Image (cartoon, rainbow, N blue to C red):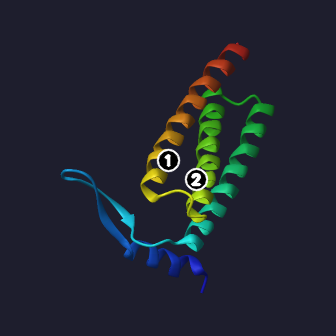
Amino acid sequence: MYPLVEESRAFFTDLKLTRIIDHVYYPAPSSAHPLFYHIVRNFAITWGAWLGLLVLIELATRDRPKRVAQTAGDCVFWIGAAYLLDKIAATSLPFGSFLALLVVIMGLGLIIRALMLMGLEGLWR
């Protein structure tokens, strides 16, 4: 059996609620799961590379600026997530920091999306 099923089961059964502040908790694994993080990282790299290729195709065919910007923002998110997953797999990043930086990467993806949309609408008019 592919290790994804076993590793996913081990990861999700290992989640415990961790307190941030009074009455605010988040689920965090109580032990490291480097193989699970590597599997998810490989998916994120593959998906991010596919989206990067798709951005190039959309730019070459002068697709709608909104679609190109959305794909570019998604590409940034998946490549950033792959980087963070690599760091957490190497145990150089705690899980709480991983979650916080994942939110930052989401924001960066939105910023890239907005900048691409502004730039492409200005160029393609």
Write the residue at 57% across / 59% down.
92
Write the residue at 44% across / 46% down.
100
Is 103 in front, or is 114? 103
Is 85 in front, or is 44? 85
Residue 12 in picture, x, y percent from top left: 41, 72
Q: Residue 56's image quarter?
A: top right
Tell me: residue 25, above or below residue 1.
above
Q: Disc 1 vs disc 2: Cβ atoms closer than 8 Å?
A: yes
Q: Secondary structure at mark 2?
A: helix
Left or right of 94, for residue 18: left
Q: Which mark is residue 52?
A: none
Q: Residue furthest bottom?
A: 1
Q: Amino acid at mark 1?
A: Leu
Q: Secondary structure at mark 1?
A: helix
Instruction: List the residue tagged with mark 1.
Output: 102
Q: Which mark is residue 84?
A: 2
